[in-house]
């Protein structure tokens, strides 16, 4: 297929913003590599009202000197001369181009063209007060055209993709639009950059100082003002600490500029630099003591990746896309208060060993995304585009095989009964089981054909390995062999024997009228913070494998049946089979993330619809909550002691849904109330800084605990915390637990992974559950402490106190928080005093 790549804004403005950097890095690789498609690079000519075709051989020179370069001879392309059934790839900041997409896209659609866009953020829509009025108008017009005409959208983060999809839902737009996430590179010092002058003496003098660095345009969305306020406190404690802002002056920041220009330490310990090229910027990153990048919203957050690439301790905000970029290597301000920032900087300043080990940890473990990786991800989609379009046009079968792995006869009977009842598109069952169960399984009765396969025969030469493997590797081995079975057809449904349909379903649940596959995810792997079970470990391994391959990071082990394309599955197995023999790989997540990243036109990504996954709402936080339930993940214990203890597995589904709704209502009410309390706590700086627990052989630090929590009566919630563990010798610790005391009584705890022998530094994010189901309404004391080999460090003498408010409404929380704020004083260690 022929592809037109529009770079009108880069050609017109010659800007060097983040978006133009993406365009440049893509273009320079495009003209240097061979692709499977024909392309032309075009830019709109406002005077001639047509496109200029920019010569490929001049692109490298243009990118090396975008400000001054002039294309000598260019061909023109009239809009009506664009080839039928071609592709327009809008990778630039197209909303600002004079050729409005509300005019262009309908013309292209009449020519049966495909429209591809790259969206970097939704700032003009989500935060219009951060944008120029002209940008807001242009962006709104641009988005109206995208929602109506676009076929595929690339995003630079899952956060931006979610913002886009939420807006699409809010606007009640039904049109199918394929989406995929591309991770941007951090190796931004391109080899095509012109030679710059050597770093001068003035710059050298700054580089030799101990400084906190902030790189980014000065604008209200970036929180340079908060950093400056924190620095005002820090410089009183540390007389050799400096602050350097690098970035151009943006808009609506007059107050900040006045604060900087009139600061008594301006050009002494406080510096604002705006004319810094890439070479000099790299030197500032290399020599920084700490880098901070605080923002209210980012589409990606390149300075975070750039900083970590140099092994810098990087303090940033935890919102929008920034955790996707910094992952577990950056330090996050959850509440964006100056106190949090001051305490974090102080911790690293005063603890040289912690500072040294954290930097070593980053350098050893942080794997930056590269522009080659970003380019290859885009090109892979473009190379596969024609195949994807042709695949959408095939005639799908009206009935599908259901392939089940089972060693639980009773579970399987109940599941087959409900599939027979609720599934209208079933062709036959293929059931894989143990040798000793084959005969018994052949007695199962159904109105559909049942084929029983012996796992020994299915596995062949891998059977001996299978017998010794763990549960997850066994599943990987069995399901990977499905691609080698002639009996398995080109499309099939894959499921476990406890995945039960609870409502009638038609084929369009899996294959849309346009031919796309519906895939159902339940979590973002990047945010899986649990470490206890083998399943937890598998989730973390899956995240690492996908991330290192530049693939999306959604978890599709949603415990409901999913549709599989055999050809795509075979491609996945060929690439990852050996990996799955060494590491626990989740076959659902590896398949859908790979296929949806390489062939996004073939998939709709949907939130899962599984009742009882998780078994209880207290098991983990709902990252994505189902809007309805189509399947039940059957757990027998829920009918014995759990939420359904007064029901049976055959009870009316409406009775089950009522009980689940009550549980979720309590969960959601608690979550909403606690979020409200956290907002108020952040606004009033009612936030703990660093909770430190020091022993002779190690130091343990906890972050992100507010002074006040709130929960609905009989409710529960989970708090996400970051910890750091610094060991001083090889003395082994058997167990570390973080726990809380509720009015002096020991509450729940979370196990902290203990360091391996010789491990000096470790850190991670954990979730601590707090339950209020047996408590009356009121205000309670929460003391936080840790236990080392079951022995408390502080116990009831812990200095780290918070308040737990149990109430019925948001109004009650606001009143209680107001009373607490007026009654108590809080010092930097988080100790309350009246």
Image (cartoon, rainbow, N blue to C red):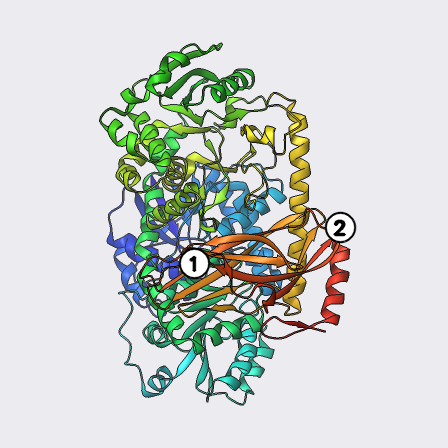
> What quarter of the picture does the C terminus occupy?
bottom right
Single out the mark in the foreground, 2 or 1.
Answer: 2
Residue at image point 45% right, 69% down: 695
Q: Nearer the viewer, residue 613 or 761?
A: 761
Image: 393 above or below 671: above
State how far apart marks 2 and 1 are (Cα): 35 Å
Residue 264, image x, y percentages: 54, 90
Residue at image point 69% right, 38% down: 662
Determine whether the residue tagged by mark 1 lies in a helix, strand or loop: helix
Q: Which residue is mark 1?
A: 328
Residue 525, image x, y percentages: 45, 47
Mark toward the start of the polypeptide (2 vs 1): 1
Image: 548 above or below 625: below
Q: Quadrant of residue 283?
A: bottom left
Residue 745, image x, y percentages: 64, 56
Q: Is residue 154 left or right of residue 730?
A: right
Residue 459, image x, y percentages: 28, 25
Q: Which residue is mark 2?
A: 808
């Amino acid at each position: 297929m022929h592809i037109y790549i529009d770079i009108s804004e880069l050609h017109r403005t010659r800007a060097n913003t983040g978006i133009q950097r993406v365009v440049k890095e893509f273009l320079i690789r495009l003209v240097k590599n061979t692709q499977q498609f024909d392309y032309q690079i075009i830019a709109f000519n406002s005077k001639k009202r047509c496109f200029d075709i920019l010569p490929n051989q001049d692109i490298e020179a243009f990118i090396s000197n975008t400000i001054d370069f002039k294309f000598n001879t260019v061909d023109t392309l009239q809009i009506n001369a664009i080839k039928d059934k071609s592709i327009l790839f809008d990778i630039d900041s197209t909303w600002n181009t004079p050729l409005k997409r509300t005019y262009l896209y309908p013309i292209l659609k009449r020519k049966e063209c495909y429209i591809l866009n790259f969206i970097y953020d939704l700032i003009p829509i989500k935060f219009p007060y951060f944008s120029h009025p002209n940008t807001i108008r242009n962006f709104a017009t641009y988005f109206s055209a995208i929602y109506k005409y676009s076929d595929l959208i690339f995003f630079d983060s899952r956060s931006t993709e979610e913002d886009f999809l939420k807006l699409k839902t809010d606007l009640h737009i039904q049109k199918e639009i394929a989406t995929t996430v591309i991770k941007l590179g951090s190796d931004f010092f391109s080899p095509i950059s012109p030679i710059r002058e050597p770093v001068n003496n003035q710059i050298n003098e700054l580089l030799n100082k101990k400084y906190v660095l902030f790189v980014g345009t000065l604008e209200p969305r970036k929180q340079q003002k908060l950093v400056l306020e924190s620095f005002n406190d820090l410089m009183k404690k540390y007389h050799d600490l400096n602050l350097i802002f690098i970035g151009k002056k943006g808009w609506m920041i007059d107050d900040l500029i006045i604060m900087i220009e009139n600061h008594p330490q301006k050009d002494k310990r406080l510096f604002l630099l705006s004319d810094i090229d890439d070479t000099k910027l790299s030197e500032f990153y290399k020599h920084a003591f700490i880098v901070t990048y605080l923002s209210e919203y980012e589409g990606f957050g390149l300075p975070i990746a750039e900083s970590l690439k140099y092994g810098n301790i990087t303090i940033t905000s935890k919102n929008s896309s920034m955790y996707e970029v910094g992952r577990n290597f950056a330090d996050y301000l959850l509440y964006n208060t100056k106190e949090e920032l001051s305490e974090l900087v102080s911790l690293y300043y005063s603890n040289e060993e912690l500072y040294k080990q954290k930097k070593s940890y980053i350098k050893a473990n942080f794997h930056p995304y590269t522009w080659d990786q970003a380019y290859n991800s885009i090109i892979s989609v473009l190379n596969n585009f024609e195949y994807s379009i042709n695949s959408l046009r095939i005639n799908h079968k009206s009935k599908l095989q259901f392939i089940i792995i089972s060693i639980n006869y009773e579970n399987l009977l109940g599941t087959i009964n409900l599939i027979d009842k609720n599934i209208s598109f079933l062709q036959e069952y293929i059931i894989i089981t143990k040798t000793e169960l084959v005969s018994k399984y052949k007695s199962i009765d159904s109105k559909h054909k049942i084929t029983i396969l012996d796992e020994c025969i299915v596995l062949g030469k891998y059977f001996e390995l299978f017998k010794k493997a763990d549960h997850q590797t066994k599943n990987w081995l069995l399901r990977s062999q499905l691609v080698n079975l002639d009996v398995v057809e080109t499309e099939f449904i894959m499921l476990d024997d406890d995945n039960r349909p609870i409502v009638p379903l038609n084929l369009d649940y899996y294959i849309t009228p346009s031919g796309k596959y519906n895939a159902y995810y339940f979590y973002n792997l990047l945010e899986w913070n649990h470490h206890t079970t083998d399943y937890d470990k598998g989730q973390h391994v899956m995240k690492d494998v996908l991330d290192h391959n530049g693939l999306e990071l959604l978890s599709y082990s949603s415990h409901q049946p999913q549709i599989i394309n055999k050809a795509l599955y075979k491609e996945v197995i060929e690439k990852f089979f050996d990996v799955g023999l060494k590491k626990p790989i989740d076959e659902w997540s590896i398949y859908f993330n790979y296929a949806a990243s390489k062939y996004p036109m073939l998939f709709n990504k949907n939130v899962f619809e599984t009742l009882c996954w998780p078994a209880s709402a207290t098991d983990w936080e709902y990252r994505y909550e189902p809007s309805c339930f189509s399947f039940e993940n059957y757990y027998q214990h829920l009918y014995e002691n759990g939420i359904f203890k007064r029901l049976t597995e055959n009870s009316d589904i409406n009775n089950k849904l009522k009980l689940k709704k009550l549980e979720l209502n309590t969960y959601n009410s608690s979550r909403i109330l606690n979020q409200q309390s956290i907002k108020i706590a952040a606004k009033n700086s009612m936030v703990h800084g660093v909770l430190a627990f020091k022993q002779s052989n190690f130091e343990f630090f906890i972050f992100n605990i507010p002074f006040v929590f709130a929960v609905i009566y009989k409710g529960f919630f989970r708090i996400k915390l970051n910890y750091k563990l610094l060991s001083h010798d090889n003395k082994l610790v058997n167990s570390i637990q973080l726990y809380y005391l509720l009015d002096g009584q020991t509450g729940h705890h979370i196990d902290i992974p203990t360091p391996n022998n010789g491990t000096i530094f470790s850190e991670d994010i954990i979730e601590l559950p707090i339950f209020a189901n047996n408590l009356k309404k009121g205000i309670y004391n929460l003391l936080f402490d840790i236990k080392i080999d079951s022995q408390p460090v502080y116990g009831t003498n812990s200095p780290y106190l918070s308040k737990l408010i149990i109430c019925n409404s948001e109004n009650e929380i606001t009143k209680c928080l107001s009373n607490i704020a007026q009654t108590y004083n809080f010092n930097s260690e988080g100790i309350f005093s009246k």
